[in-house]
Image (tube, coloured by chain):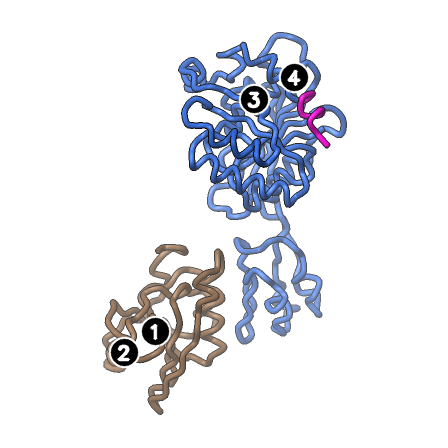
C-alpha cells in the first residue's frame, strides 16, 4: 500500500506525520520525501548507507550541419522551448518538458537528445531506533534555478516498494508537484490545521484528490489552535478525521531540535502504528 | 522602417510599457508612412514561462526592424539578436515620445540583456 501525506497549505505538518507514521510501524516501510523543492524529512532521521546520484532529463541539441531551418520543431513545441528565426533555430533547455516531440518531427534528424541534470536522488537507511526494523528512505532535491520538479518527483516515486508499506511526504499545494507525488497512491492523508487558511486549502486538496479518484482522510494538526471548522467540513463531506494532534509545547520544542513527533511525544506512537490499519478499514 | 514599441495601449499616445516579454502589446510604427498597427501580447503577459521568447517571435514575424522598450531579459534578447533586430531602451513617457527620441538618435542600443528573466 502507498499512503501519500499531502496538504493544500504548507507548514501544516506533512513531514511530521509522514516521519512519525514511518517510525511507528512494526513492519519494514519505505519513506519517500517527494517535496523536492525543500526536502526536510531527513532533518528528523539518522541516515546511514547514504548514496546519491544525479537525476537527469533529456533535452534537445540541434546539429546545425543537418538543420534545414524548416521550423517544424519550433511549431511543434508547446512550451516555446525552441525558436525558429530565419535560418536560426534555438533551444531553450530551461523551458523544455522533455517530451521528445521535436526530435520526432525533425525531417532531417538534426535533433538529438542529451541528458541534462536537474536534481539529485538520495537513498539511505534510517537508524533512528535500535529495534530491528527496517526503513528505506529516499529523497529528491531539485537543483536551485530549475523550474520543473515532476521529473525529480517521479524518480523518487519509482522507489516505492512493490510490496509492503510506502509513505510519501508530498510537496504542498495542489498543482503539478503535488499531483505528481499523489498520483497512483492508494490513499491520501491530508494534514491541515483548524484555521480559515487551513480549511480553505484543505478544500482545494480534497477537490484535487477526488478528481484523481483517490480516497482521503484528514489529520488535524495543532487541533486546539483554531476552531471546529475543519471537523464540520469533514463531517459534511463524509471525510474521516483520522487523528487530532493538539497544540503541545513539548512537540514544538522537539521539532525545533529535529526530533520526530513520536520521539518527543511517544504517546502518539500507537495511534500512528495503527493508522495504516484504520486507513485500510475506512477504504471503500 | 517598422519599429516595434512596447505599449500599454493601442495608440501612439499610450504609455510605453517598460516590460518586453510581458508588455501589454506592441505598437508597430512605420516611420516612413506613419502608419500604426497594434500587436496584442495578452497571451504572453499571462504565460508562466517563455513570455520573452514568444513575444520576440511575434515581433520578428510582424516584420519589425527595431525594438524600443524599457527592459529586455536574456531569452528575449537572444531571439531578437538572432533575428538581427536592434533593441533600444527608453525610460518612459508615451510611445510617440519614444519613437521621436529614437528618430533623433537619443536612445541607446543595448548589446546584452539589461535585466534578468522574470525581473518584475
Residue at x-position 61% and y-position 38% = A181
Q: Colour of chain A?
A: blue
The label on residue A235 is none
Q: Label 1, on which residue?
A: B9
**A109 or A158, nearer to the observer:** A158
The answer to whether residue A282 is magenta is yes
Q: Label 4, on which residue?
A: A274
From the image, state whether disc 4 or disc 3 is nearer to you: 3
> Residue A128: horizontal and vertical position, in percent?
57, 14
Residue lying furthest top in this view? A130
Q: Label 3, on which residue?
A: A243
Q: Are marks 4 and 3 in contact (CB under 8 Å)?
A: no
Q: Secondary structure at mark 2?
A: loop
Q: Please determine if labels 1 and 2 lie on a single subunit.
A: yes
Q: Label 2, on which residue?
A: B13
Q: Please determine if labels 1 and 4 lie on a single subunit.
A: no
> Residue A48: horizontal and vertical position, in percent?
59, 18
Looking at the image, is mark 4 or mark 3 earlier in the sequence? 3
Whether residue B66 is visible here, answered yes or no, is: yes
From the viewer's perspective, tell me whether residue A222 is left or right of residue A84: left
Amino acid at each position: 500500500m502507498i499512503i501519500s501525506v499531502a496538504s493544500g497549505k504548507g507548514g501544516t505538518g506533512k513531514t511530521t506525520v509522514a516521519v512519525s507514521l514511518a517510525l511507528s510501524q512494526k513492519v519494514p516501510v519505505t519513506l519517500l520525501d517527494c517535496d523536492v523543492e525543500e526536502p526536510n524529512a531527513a532533518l528528523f532521521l539518522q541516515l546511514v548507507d547514504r548514496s546519491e546520484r544525479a537525476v537527469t532529463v533529456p533535452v534537445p541539441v540541434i546539429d546545425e550541419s543537418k538543420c534545414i531551418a524548416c521550423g517544424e520543431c519550433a511549431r511543434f513545441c508547446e512550451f516555446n522551448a525552441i525558436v525558429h528565426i530565419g535560418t536560426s533555430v534555438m533551444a531553450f533547455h530551461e523551458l523544455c518538458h522533455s517530451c521528445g516531440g521535436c526530435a520526432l518531427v525533425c525531417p532531417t534528424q538534426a535533433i538529438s537528445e542529451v541528458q541534462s541534470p536537474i536534481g539529485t536522488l538520495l537513498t539511505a537507511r534510517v537508524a533512528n531506533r535500535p529495534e530491528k526494523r527496517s526503513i528505506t528512505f529516499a529523497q529528491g532535491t531539485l537543483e536551485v534555478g530549475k523550474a520543473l520538479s515532476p521529473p525529480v518527483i517521479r524518480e523518487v516515486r519509482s522507489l516505492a516498494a512493490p510490496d509492503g508499506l510506502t509513505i510519501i511526504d508530498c510537496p504542498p499545494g495542489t498543482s503539478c508537484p503535488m499531483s505528481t507525488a499523489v498520483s497512483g497512491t492508494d490513499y491520501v492523508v491530508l494534514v491541515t490545521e483548524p484555521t480559515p487558511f487551513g480549511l480553505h486549502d484543505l478544500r482545494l486538496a480534497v477537490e484535487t484528490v477526488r478528481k484523481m479518484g483517490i480516497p482521503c482522510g484528514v489529520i488535524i494538526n495543532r487541533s486546539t489552535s483554531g476552531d471546529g471548522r475543519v471537523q464540520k467540513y469533514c463531517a459534511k463531506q463524509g471525510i474521516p478525521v483520522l487523528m487530532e494532534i493538539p497544540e503541545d509545547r513539548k512537540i514544538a520544542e522537539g521539532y525545533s531540535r529535529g526530533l520526530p513527533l513520536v520521539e518527543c511525544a511517544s504517546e502518539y506512537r500507537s495511534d500512528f502504528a495503527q493508522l495504516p490499519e484504520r486507513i485500510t478499514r475506512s477504504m471503500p | 522602417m517598422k519599429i516595434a514599441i512596447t505599449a500599454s495601449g493601442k495608440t501612439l499616445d499610450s504609455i510605453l510599457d517598460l516590460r518586453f516579454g510581458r508588455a501589454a502589446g506592441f505598437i508597430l510604427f512605420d516611420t516612413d508612412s506613419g502608419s500604426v498597427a497594434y500587436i496584442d501580447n495578452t497571451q504572453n503577459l499571462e504565460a508562466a514561462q517563455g513570455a520573452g521568447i514568444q513575444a520576440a517571435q511575434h515581433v520578428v514575424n510582424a516584420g519589425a526592424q527595431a525594438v524600443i522598450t524599457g527592459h529586455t531579459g536574456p531569452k528575449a534578447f537572444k531571439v531578437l539578436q538572432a533575428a538581427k533586430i536592434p533593441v533600444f531602451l527608453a525610460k518612459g513617457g508615451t510611445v510617440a515620445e519614444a519613437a521621436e527620441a529614437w528618430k533623433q538618435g537619443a536612445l541607446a542600443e543595448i548589446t546584452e540583456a539589461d535585466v534578468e528573466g522574470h525581473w518584475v
